[in-house]
């Protein structure tokens, strides 16, 4: 059941490069990453690709296959026609180191800008008591494997590089939402989400949700709820007035 | 953690792919269909607002686009609770008075925002397809920052939904019972399904809380709203076409074009 497939693979260092043509053997049950490895073994020994687990769990093998952000190790060859030419390129939003390997340090810089979990000063480790329903919402977000395909596909920075300093990307806006919803987190994150991390740039067009390999409902469950919390804080005069009059405790 | 390869200027560059997208599938189909769907609604809406036959006295049907009817020009039976708070001076079509409420609700809805940002503004038309605009600030500044008023439209939409349900009940208790009553009822149900699945509603019920366990009732409401919210997109389309269908049906009955027994 093997056949010869036509591939176009981006080759080059830094941003300079071009699509190179290959014809390569494909066997039953293989995924795109297997084919890239076969190219390395047979035709292009210096082809650079980042990978680790081959099980969709480490988030290393993010690439763009026929223009769509995908995990190379989770994209089955059987989803393509045998006569189809398959184009493989590095993630477009991040600088290229070599071939399919991009420099994703943008994401680590953004991660560092978010203050970590901040429990109340008088609760010591070991004293946390939480109900399952209270942490369920944030648990969805912890499935993230940090493949950064959501940040890669987001048009706010993909099509507008100049927005990078002002926008943390869906991955880290989701991190802010996760902490803001946490019953034991007392840091003030709503103002910062809008002013420092660029939540307002998101126009909820849901591409992050479309590409997430963990099927996290990033837009519906993290970004929009966070936008609503920001409205409470910044744009809703009645909530503001209510909080002034009743001095509601954080619930 | 951070990469430590030497900082050559070429390494600061992303892959210089010269095409807008490398997607090979029919990515343009969904935005095209959305564009046509939303446009058809706009065209129908303009016609319906200007059309005068919105009431069927013999069956107590009132077209959803004209309800509540608040002008003096509304026929006696069509007036909401018999009221006509707008005086004789108001001579424009009565539908114009209330148009802004459901209109503003849908215009600022998170789902409709996604659909028209994609299909009308192409920002982006589809995922991983480059948008045609040179600059982008999203919803950070005027005018799009106004989208944040959505929750107020939600409160008003609850009122409109209740009025449409009331209209349906009036038609249902009227004898003889006609097909139109059931159409109005179906429309009211879909409108409620859409309205209660709103993200602002989800936030108000309990989304804004961090301790669900301290608010069991609100948590249950949130669970219910979350289920509807997951269907918000299909409900947005279903209720848009049901309101259009019900409106057209009533007008065709009023014009005598639909005239079978029990219409
Ligand atoms: S929904 Fe928002 S964050 Fe996600 S891809 Fe779209 S614009 Fe970016
Ligand atoms: S949220 Fe999903 S797409 Fe984004 S980095 Fe995590 S796993 Fe990848
Ligand atoms: S190699 Fe780990 S996710 Fe693909
Ligand atoms: S009605 Fe769609 S989000 Fe509120």
Image (cartoon, helix red, strand yellow):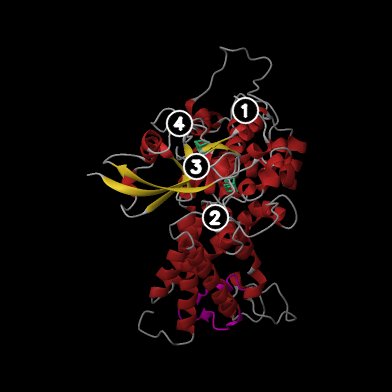
Please identify, in this view, whether the residue under mark 1 or under mark 4 is nearer the observer.
1
- Where is the C terminus of chain A found, in terms of image quarters? top right
Occupied quadrant, residue A74: top left
Disc 2 to disc 1, C-alpha distance: 31 Å
Occupied quadrant, residue B96: bottom right
Disc 3 to disc 4, C-alpha distance: 25 Å
- Which residue is the site of mark 2? B129
Chain letter for mark 2: B
- Which residue is the site of mark 4? A51
- In the image, is the residue at mark 1 within 8 Å of ligand 3 by its beta carbon? no
Q: Which residues are magenta?
A: B50-69
A194 to the left or right of B241: right
Residue nearest the observer in this picture, A200 or B12? B12
Helix, strand or loop under label 2:
loop
Mark number displayed over residue B150? none
B70 to the left or right of A21: right
Helix, strand or loop under label 4:
loop
Magenta run includes residue B56: yes
């Amino acid at each position: 059941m093997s056949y010869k497939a036509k591939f176009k693979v981006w080759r080059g260092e830094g941003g300079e490069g071009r699509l190179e043509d290959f014809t390569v053997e494909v066997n039953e049950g293989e995924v795109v990453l297997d084919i890239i490895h076969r190219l390395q073994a047979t035709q292009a020994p210096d082809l650079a690709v980042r990978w680790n687990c081959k099980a969709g769990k480490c988030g290393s093998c993010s690439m763009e296959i026929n223009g769509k952000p995908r995990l190379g190790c989770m994209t089955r060859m059987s989803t393509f026609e045998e006569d189809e030419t398959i184009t493989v390129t590095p993630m477009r939003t991040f600088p290229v180191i070599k071939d399919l390997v991009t420099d994703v340090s943008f994401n680590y810089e953004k991660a560092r800008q978010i203050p970590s979990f901040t429990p109340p000063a008088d609760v010591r480790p070991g004293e946390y008591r939480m109900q399952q329903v209270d942490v369920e919402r944030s648990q969805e977000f912890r499935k993230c494997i940090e493949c950064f395909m959501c940040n890669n596909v987001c048009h706010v920075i993909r099509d507008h590089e100049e927005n990078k300093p002002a926008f943390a990307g869906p991955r880290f806006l989701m991190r802010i939402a996760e902490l803001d919803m946490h019953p034991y987190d007392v840091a003030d994150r709503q103002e910062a989400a809008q002013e420092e991390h660029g939540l307002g740039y998101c126009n909820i067009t849901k591409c992050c949700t479309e590409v997430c390999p963990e099927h996290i409902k990033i837009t519906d469950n993290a970004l929009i709820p966070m936008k609503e919390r920001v409205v409470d804080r910044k744009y809703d005069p009645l909530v503001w007035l209510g909080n002034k009059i009743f001095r509601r405790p954080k619930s | 953690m951070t990469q430590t390869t030497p900082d050559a200027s070429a390494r600061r560059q992303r892959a210089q792919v010269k095409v807008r997208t490398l997607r090979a599938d029919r990515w343009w189909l969904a935005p095209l269909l959305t564009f046509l769907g939303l446009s058809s609604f706009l065209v129908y809406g303009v016609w319906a607002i200007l059309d005068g036959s919105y009431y069927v006295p013999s069956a107590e049907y009132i077209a959803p686009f004209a309800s509540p009817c608040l002008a003096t020009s509304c026929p006696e039976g069509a007036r909401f609770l018999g009221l006509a708070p707008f005086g004789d001076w108001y001579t424009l079509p009565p539908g114009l008075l209330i148009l802004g409420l459901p209109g503003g609700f849908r215009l600022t809805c998170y789902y409709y925002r996604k659909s028209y940002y994609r299909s009308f503004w192409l920002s982006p038309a589809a995922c991983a397809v480059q948008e045609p605009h040179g600059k982008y600030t999203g919803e950070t500044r005027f005018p799009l920052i106004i989208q944040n008023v959505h929750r107020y439209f939600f409160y008003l939409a609850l009122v409109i939904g209740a009025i449409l349900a009331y209209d349906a009940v009036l038609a249902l208790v009227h004898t003889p019972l006609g097909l139109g009553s059931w159409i109005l009822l179906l429309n009211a149900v879909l409108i409620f399904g859409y309205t209660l699945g709103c993200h602002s509603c989800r936030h108000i019920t309990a989304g804004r809380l961090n301790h669900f366990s301290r608010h069991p009732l609100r948590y249950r409401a949130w669970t219910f709203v979350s289920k509807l919210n997951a269907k918000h997109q299909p409900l947005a389309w279903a209720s848009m076409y049901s309101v259009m269908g019900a409106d057209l049906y009533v007008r065709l009955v009023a014009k005598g074009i639909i005239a079978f027994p029990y219409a």
